[in-house]
Image (spheres, rainbow, N blue to C red):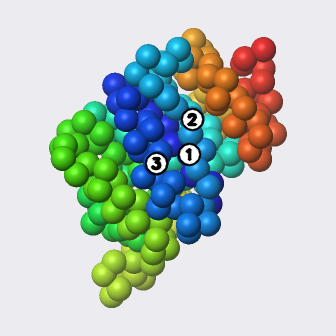
């Protein structure tokens, strides 16, 4: 699995810490991590939590990433922004139980974490345990076990509903503020990683035209 890490501006100073905990947990499992920044609080290419939603959607819908780890001060804004787009099911995760149950009950492809609220002494340990529960035990297997059949059925129903209520990604991108969109994809790190990993030529062509 290719996992993307994206930080917005208010919590960008924690990017290196989050990346370290994430890689320490998931790389021994055979997963890879791509760091899309922001890399520091004074990064030239600033990202708001709204732009995180845009980037996350582009990465997931294009196949450039299989999973997105993101967040903001509380995690709420990043979660809402991510869930504004098709092809994204983002959970709000504060602790390892949230991580485990989201992975098995909701079977999404992104999580938003609070990187300020409650992030004090032992914050890096909480991240480690969250990533272990999120990626170390599979996905979509249900919890508790006697609920696996209805939970898997409800996930398929949700996917079908979202397929009817959400527009294709390129239509969404066409309809939002284009300067906001260009700012989201302005980072050289994004362009380098995205074009190397993108599996959807339609989305790749759209981004090339946008940044031309």
Classify mark 2: helix, strand or loop: loop
Q: How many residues crowd around disc 2 within 10 Å: few (fewer than 14), some, or many (20 or more)?
A: many
Report the front residue among 135 and 160.
135
Labels 3 and 2: the sequence-earlier one: 3
Work out how far the residue at label 1 is from the one at label 2, CA to CA, in angstroms.
Answer: 7 Å
| Quarter of the N terminus within the rendering | bottom right
Q: Report which residue position mark 2 lands on.
A: 36
Q: How many residues crowd around disc 1 within 10 Å: few (fewer than 14), some, or many (20 or more)?
A: many
Name the residue located 30 percent from the left edge and 81 percent from the top edge: 144
> Whole-percent x and y of residue 129?
33, 62
Work out how far the residue at label 3 is from the one at label 2, CA to CA, in angstroms.
Answer: 14 Å
> Whole-percent x and y of residue 212?
78, 14
Residue 141, located in which quarter of the rendered image? bottom left
Classify mark 3: helix, strand or loop: helix
Q: Are marks 3 and 2 in contact (CB under 8 Å)?
A: no
Q: Which mark is on residue 4?
A: 1
Work out how far the residue at label 1 is from the one at label 3, CA to CA, in angstroms.
Answer: 13 Å
Labels 1 and 3: the sequence-earlier one: 1
Q: Which mark is on residue 20?
A: 3
């Amino acid at each position: 699995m290719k996992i993307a890490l994206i930080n917005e501006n208010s919590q960008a100073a924690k990017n290196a810490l989050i990346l370290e905990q994430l890689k320490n947990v998931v790389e021994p499992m055979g997963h890879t991590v791509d760091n899309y920044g922001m890399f520091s609080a004074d990064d030239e290419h600033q990202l708001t939590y709204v732009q995180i939603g845009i980037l996350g959607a582009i990465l997931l819908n294009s196949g450039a990433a299989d999973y997105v780890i993101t967040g903001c001060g509380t995690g709420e804004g990043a979660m809402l922004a991510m869930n504004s787009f098709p092809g994204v099911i983002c959970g709000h995760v504060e602790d390892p139980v949230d991580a485990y149950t989201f992975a098995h009950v909701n079977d999404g492809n992104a999580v938003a974490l609070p990187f300020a609220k409650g992030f004090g002494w032992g914050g890096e340990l909480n991240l480690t345990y969250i990533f272990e529960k999120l990626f170390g035990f599979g996905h979509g297997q249900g919890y508790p076990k006697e609920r696996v059949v209805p939970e898997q059925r409800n996930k398929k129903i949700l996917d079908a509903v979202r397929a009817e209520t959400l527009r294709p990604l390129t239509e969404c991108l066409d309809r939002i503020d284009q300067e906001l969109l260009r700012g989201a994809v302005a980072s050289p790190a994004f362009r380098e990683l995205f074009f190397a990993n993108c599996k959807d030529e339609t989305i790749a062509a759209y981004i090339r035209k946008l940044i031309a």
